Amino acid sequence: MRRGLRHPGLVGTHQERAGDAAGLAAELRAAVAGDVDFSVTARALTTMDASNYRRVPDGTVAPRDADDVAAVLEVCRAHGTPVVARGAGTSIGGQATGTGVVLDFTRHMARLVSLDPEGRTAVVGPGLVLDRLREAARPYGLTFGPDPSTHSRCTLGGMIGNNACGAHSVAWGTTADNVRSLNVVTYRGERLTLGRGGPEGGAASGASGAPAGLLDLVGGHLSLLRTGYPPGLPRRISGYALDALLPERGVDVARSFCGSEGTLGVLTEATVRLVPLPAEPVLVVLGYADESAAAEAAAGLLPYGPLTVEGMAADLVRGAAGLPRGAAWLFCEVDGEGAARALDRAADAVDSTVVRDPAGQRALWRIREDAAGTATRSRDGTEAWPGWEDCAVPPARLGAYLREFRALMAEFGLHGVPYGHFGDGCVHVRIDFDLWTDKGVRDFRRFSEAVADLVVAHGGSLSGEHGDGQARAELLPRMYGKELVGLFGAVKDVWDPDGGLNPGVLVRPRPLDEGLRFAGLPLVGLGREAARCVGVAKCRAAGPSSGPGVMCPSYRATGEEKHSTRGRARLLHEMALGEVVTDGWRSEEVREALDLCLSCKGCRSDCPVGVDMAAYKAEFLDRHYAGPLGFLRRPRSHWTMGRLPHWLDVFGRGLNAGMRLPFAARLAGVTPERAMPRVADRTFTSWFAERASVRTAALTLWPDTFTDHLAPEVGRAAVRVLEAAGLGVALPQGRVCCGLTYVSTGQLGAARRVMRRTLDVMAGGEERATGPTGPVVVLEPSCASTLRTDLPELLPDDPRAARLAASVRTFAEALETLAPDWEPPRLDRPVTGQTHCHQHAVLGDAADRRLRARAGLTGDLAGGCCGLAGNFGFEPDHYEVSVTCAQDQLLPALSDAPPEATVLADGFSCRTQMGDLAGVRGRHLAEVLAEAVDEEETGS
């Protein structure tokens, strides 16, 4: 590295580097008020962003203010240590990773400093999440125009660093178009306020805030700046925007700083422009015969003033519900019914849909927003990666470019699904590169070079949204030529003569095939599974705009990256590599991060790439406590709560007396803040065995542990309703258990034994290899989820497991499919409560919604996780997080409900949490319907 910067090459022995890092950390702690963290966990969490790259930092600092930023830079400059600014870490090009010190602005510098509705401006800290700004501006009818699909977690600082855009850029432009002034600190500690200079430019105007020497350097290259940038390209994000410094463009230093990817200075505050929200947003979805037709139509729609012109083809969409006929679509948002009709008439589309309902619009937009993750996994399960993520060509050239691009992928034997901002000519695509083998990496380089030439041939930009980072910066000479790229380097040296800010990115970059995050990972196992996390960080979303999903309750409770799905995946990734996390399955850092995972399974459905942290946690715990003395290291709750089905079968009601003994909670390994649920006087199975069979069984009702021992009234109610619907009910001829509590505590050997015994019972004996011949109705959502997913995954070689999984039905599904003509009694009242997180993630609640509607139960149930989550909320040190999770969605839903609302919760944990924290008795839907059936028959 140039000019004396010592760190980027990681020169020296491991011991020497560790000693330097320790000294650096000590000096930083003495110099700053913020948080200095050089721990294994902090380093592991910041080795990657949302790109293919990985760099290991020395540590992180979360500064509290601009003074802290200046102090960090002073200490790091004295040590010759580089500094990387990081927001949400969702950068695609690798620019949010680095060696040295990573600055985390999301913890303390995330303030909305001020908002001026009349002036339509806001002053923001670099760590402020975009949606928090939008929520604050919405009551004034304003918003921040750029809106990338990561709006629920990306930060304003990151958007400025990458010059982010989003779907509305055809109307409101890029982030650079919406910045008024920027406060920055250079690596040498100079504090600058960047803005526009006078129309004549030059340092004499004094208004631009340019560092010394910058405007003189630009003044010597005016001709190059006027001719070196491709014209007619609204999404030109690559390189430095030095043409913004031209006199005829107002010497706009703030604009030129946008998109510099943290290589010039560190942002500490920004003044940004706000724009009016559309008064009557209408979404017009246009269907076309194919992708090329949609792409070629996009530019022709721009004269009609659309706010968005987004495109995607059928190979991206998993289910075309709500979309018009066609094999490709344009999503065009306009302001007003008249504008919608005019655009619809002008579009030469196969079919169209005009959506006025806000909920319908959100549902369709969710398809587009999730594309960044959905596109990472093709229909056949093949993984796809960034690497050629977001090039842009002039909109009029988009159709031709896409045809040639797809042909180039075919030539290389690659597959990807283009989509993106067709109105701006910007295309996103994830491609199934083989980044695990030497040959695959060589092909990755060859393809990147070839497609760069293709983009340049169409007059395009290598990056149209996410920046160059390491992924594309090496190819910039193909776009700009050596002279202009050389000027980029000279500008970098004016701003940062020591080369201390984000070295190896954008200017003098590392090779695009160096430092790939897959290098050294085993091809199979948990590390390989964790690597599917591409870092889009949907798990970091929080607040009202995060939607109705579940993921990730522990992050929403703590706000700490290590308690997000992505953070845990990164730790598992680093554990598999063994460089930062060095003690493998015994890692306390990984165990600590997984400790607050509620195993809610929300990530299985809400994560765009289907990361399944509940399964990863189970495997880690199983291996973490393996070995001859592993059982001694396990938490006591694993033996009590984790084997609850066994203890209930053995002791039954005797546990009630046992839990009243002094120190019972401590001996059982549960928190004293919780009262243990009372075991019922009579089990559901004993009640069922003593009643006469009403009719020939049409289904098997699963007597899960919770229903059997703790809530037999739910089982009795279900039998009442099912029989009222004309369905005969049978129970398994023996004790069955799904193994849920064993799985969630990582006792996988015991879980498999329990599951095999259950399969024997369901098959009618060990000698039989068949499974259930009819539907198996499971009342407890967590048990149904375990049977649907964990059972076949843990016993993949037993065909009975797959058959049982396929036979599982929820209560509502059974009524809908087995008794379609049955009409439930009309209740005609509102409902509140919560959909079980496992039902949301694995089972779905569409049948439940339809059943409630038929019964006249109106309103939606809350999303999220109740926070109790089986054994989680009973374990020591989890109570506070458990309560915070409930406060996120469940408790507000209960408090906001009208007094006549029926409180529904099919999950035993959800009902228990409601009772403990709100004093409310939640009921299973079967109980509510059974009560109504009885009232209807007695006429009361």
Image (cartoon, rainbow, N blue to C red):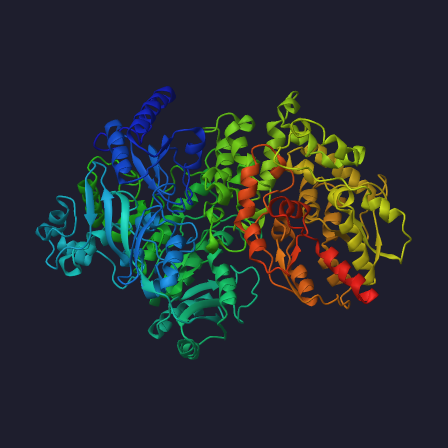
Report x, y in % for residue 65: 29, 40
Residue 351, placed above or below residue 517? below
Query: Foreground residue, 397 or 800?
Result: 800
Where does the image place residue 436, in percent across and percent down from the top left? Answer: 48, 39
Residue 511 point in image, percent of width and height: 34, 40
Q: Residue at x 29, y 60 (%)?
A: 459
The residue lying at 60 percent from left, 41 percent from top is: 599
Left or right side of 535 for 930: right
Camera-side residue: 729 or 911? Answer: 911
Quadrant where the image shows the C terminus: bottom right
Q: Quadrant of residue 858?
A: bottom right
Residue in the image at 19% along x and 58% along y: 227
Residue 379 in the figure: left or right of residue 199: right
Q: Is residue 733 above or below residue 583?
A: below
Would you say residue 337 is visible in this rendering? yes
* Res 168 seen here: no
Q: Nearer the viewer, residue 689 or 680?
A: 680
Total marks placed:
0
